[in-house]
Amino acid sequence: MSLSDAQRGELNLAVHEYLLASGYPSAAASLAVEAPLEDAPTEAPADKSGLLLEKKWTAVVRLQKKVMELESKLEAVSAELQGPKKLGGQRDATSWIPRPPAKEVSGHRLPVTKVLFHPVFSVFLTASEDSTMKIWDYETGEYERTLKGHTNTVQDMAFNARGSLLASCSADMTVRLWDFDAFECTKVMRGHDHNISSIAFTPSGEHLISASRDTTIRIWEVGTGFNVRSIKKHTEWVRCARPDPSGTLIASCSNDQTVRIWTFDNGSEKHVMNKHTHVIEELQWAPTASKASINIAMGIEDESMFSEGPFLATGSRDKKIILWDAGSGVAIHTFTGHDSWVRSLKWHPGGNLLLSSGDDKSMRVWDIKTKRCTKTIAAHNHFVQSIDMHPTTPYLVSGSVDQTAKIWECQ
């Protein structure tokens, strides 16, 4: 690329200035004659710190360095684009975790008690002490509609596998079944004598399992709404009861500080597990993808020796999370780090991470293999009562006593 006359004149003056300043007056005089340079100075400048040629040269060096940095970044991006596709930015789906900032949604008049993703649609639900459930688009954060029917705090919600049915339970002592396509309540199930704190579908979708402050666990037939079995062995409020992924077992936790394992078919008790020292708020069965990580945490690396579990995690007001082998009834490991009650747990779909939230206003990410907390996130301005993670897209939602829910993109 050729220089313009103005650029050429500026460069010649800069070279002339540099030659004078560097002690080459004869060379400078020859350049002034041959260039030619009109009104060229004959003496070196008094201030040599602002020489134009030196400024231009150092600028070129800086630009060359910047170009090299950009080329390096371009190569990294090109390699990422040509490699396997990943969710959530630079991490693949087995390891992405929530990153701030979060998108906040609000609309409830009282604390949010539960958040839940729909298994198919790009929406999530919030339940509240204001007795309503609200539906939100998790990609845009836009409010969609409110489901009304309960007359007291909505404590828990659950979808069947296809997302066609929604179950909810409340302090009004009812379980409600909703047609999620029509957004209508189709059944109201009564039988508990006190606050109902948890609800869950069995994997087949044919039954619901509820837990209540009346110290019982009840199994309901979805098709008829009939209460087909009641289990009563806990001595205090049953906070949570959930079926394992196979549908053959039920785990429950209670104010009586025990975790109990039951057979689904006849309600017989298999194990009573004691290690927590306060009310147990939450339990979550580990997905199949967690088996390898949990066995490694147990010190077993030979796959042929792996324990089949099944495994589950519990969170308590004693600020601890305990990982259990439900097959043997043995505690595997106790995770400590929360500064207050542990309220909610959620297994990462990748299997190696467990997420938790609590009354210390934080969310935490626990690595199962290393048995350490790898990230702490200041999530809300008040207690974080519930979290949920989408099984296939990189999103997590959290709900708080501050009456808001937050949508976190994962990377």
Image (spheres, rainbow, N blue to C red):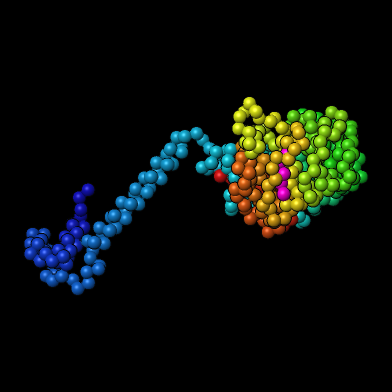
Q: Residue at x 68, y 47 (%)?
A: 335
Q: Quadrant of residue 326?
A: top right
Q: Nearer the viewer, residue 14 or 146?
A: 14
Coordinates of residue 133 in the picture (x, y in percent): 76, 47
Q: Is residue 22 above or below residue 394?
A: below
Q: Is residue 26 above or below residue 130?
A: below
Coordinates of residue 6 in the picture (x, y in percent): 20, 59
Q: Identify the residue at the far bottom of this view.
A: 46
Confirm whether the magenta stretch covers residue 232: no
Q: Quadrant of residue 192?
A: top right
- Residue 39 lies left or right of residue 122; in this view the side is left
Q: Residue at x 9, y 62 (%)?
A: 27
Which region of the structure is painted magenta? 320-324
Location of the C terminus by quadrant is: top right
Q: Residue at x 85, y 34 (%)?
A: 269
Q: Nearer the viewer, residue 206 or 23?
A: 23
Can residue 235 be seen here? The reply is yes
Coordinates of residue 371 in the picture (x, y in percent): 63, 44
Coordinates of residue 56 in the picture (x, y in percent): 26, 59
Q: Identify the residue at the far front of this view.
A: 299
Can residue 284 be seen here? The reply is no
- The mark tally for this picture is 0
- Residue 280 lies left or right of residue 298; in this view the side is right
- Residue 298 lies left or right of residue 133; in this view the side is left
